[in-house]
């Protein structure tokens, strides 16, 4: 990155995002604030940020970008210019964020793991760690069980059982090819399995653990639900019983008025 940067006075935030840009592929949103690059407060402006990120791509490196969204910080890995438009914050907004960021614990990129979040319309989330597991190639059933893909596991066992019953050599060849394929394409397989369950990509971040990643997502979506989590139960919309009852008398709540129209 350039060494002759001129210190500015304002942080910048995203104003417009075009489809297909690096910002969109990282699920950034309008009004997200660029706070820091590799744990250093970034007040050098849009042009310098673009140049620094292009330099990172040129050198085939990765950088840790810190974002502020809805009063919550989160980090993600960037490898290229974001490709979006920015606007500057006011001095008051910048000072407030700087003060807030100064109390935040920072960690180097090698201390963090990248996670991809997927969710369905019922706010059921699945967080997938963006890394390769050796177990996917050595023992696919164990990998599928660890990934909680039970229906795929049962299907795999059924197919292997049938091939074993037909011919042991067919079983061995099939198992070997499946193991190799699972190891090479394990992330794409996990994404595909989640999409078959009705989930779509919605978030990307880096965190120290799966629990921490879930905690960050819960801050953005209080109604988020995870299959296995240490978090408390998600926020549930409360129903105003008084409005639903419309002050009906207890002895008349199951009685239909003759003037009402009943559709069966």
Image (spheres, rainbow, N blue to C red):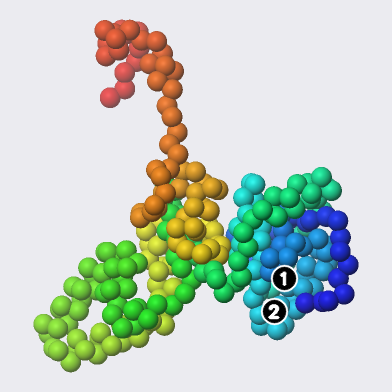
Describe residue 27's horizontal placement relative to residue 253 as left or right.
right
In the rendered image, the vertical position of residue 161 relative to residue 20, given as above or below: below
Describe residue 211's horizontal placement relative to residue 5 as left or right.
left
Of callouts 2 and 1, the N-terminal one: 2
In the rendered image, the vertical position of residue 39 relative to residue 32, given as above or below: below
Count of numbered circles on the image:
2
Describe residue 198's horizontal placement relative to residue 116 as left or right.
left
Residue 126: quarter of image: bottom left
In this view of the protein, which residue sits in the foreground, 12 or 263?
12
Identified at 78% across, 69% down, the residue is 50
Is the residue marked by circle 1 packed among few (<14), some (14-19), or many (20+) residues within 10 Å? some
In this view of the protein, which residue sits in the foreground, 103 or 155?
103
CB contact under 8 Å: marks 2 and 1? yes
Cα gap from disc 2 to disc 1, whole angstroms:
8 Å
Report which residue position mark 2 lands on. Answer: 57
Identified at 78% across, 56% down, the residue is 12
In the rendered image, the vertical position of residue 207 relative to residue 95, given as above or below: below
The quarter in which the N terminus is drawn is: bottom right
SS under mark 2: helix
Identified at 56% across, 62% down, the residue is 205
SS under mark 1: loop
Is the residue marked by circle 2 packed among few (<14), some (14-19), or many (20+) residues within 10 Å? some
The quarter in which the C terminus is drawn is: top left
The location of residue 92, given as percent across then percent down, is 82, 45
Q: Which mark is residue 183?
A: none
Report which residue position mark 1 lands on. Answer: 81
Describe residue 40's horizontal placement relative to residue 206 as left or right.
right
């Amino acid at each position: 990155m350039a060494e002759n940067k001129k210190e500015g006075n304002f942080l910048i935030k995203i104003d417009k995002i075009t489809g297909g840009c690096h910002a969109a592929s990282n699920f950034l949103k309008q009004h997200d604030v660029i706070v820091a690059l590799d744990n250093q407060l970034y007040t050098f402006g849009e042009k310098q940020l673009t140049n620094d990120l292009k330099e990172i791509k040129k050198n085939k490196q990765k950088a840790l970008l810190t974002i502020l969204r809805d009063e919550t910080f989160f980090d993600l890995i960037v490898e290229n210019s974001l490709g979006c438009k920015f606007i500057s914050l006011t001095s008051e907004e910048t000072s407030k964020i700087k003060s807030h960021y100064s109390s935040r614990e920072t960690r180097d990129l090698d201390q963090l793991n990248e996670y991809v979040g997927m969710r369905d319309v019922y706010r059921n989330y699945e967080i997938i760690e963006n890394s390769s597991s050796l177990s996917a190639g050595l023992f696919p059933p164990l990998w599928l069980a660890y990934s909680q893909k039970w229906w795929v596991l049962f299907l795999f066992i059924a197919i292997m059982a049938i091939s074993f019953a037909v011919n042991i050599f067919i079983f061995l060849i099939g198992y070997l090819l499946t193991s190799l394929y699972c190891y090479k394409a394990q992330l794409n397989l996990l994404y595909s399995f989640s999409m078959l369950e009705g989930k779509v990509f919605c978030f990307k971040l880096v965190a120290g653990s799966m629990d921490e990643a879930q905690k960050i997502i819960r801050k953005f979506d209080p109604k988020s639900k995870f299959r296995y989590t240490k978090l408390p139960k998600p926020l549930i919309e409360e129903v105003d019983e008084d409005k639903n009852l419309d002050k009906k008398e207890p002895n008349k709540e199951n009685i239909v008025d003759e003037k009402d129209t009943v559709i069966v």
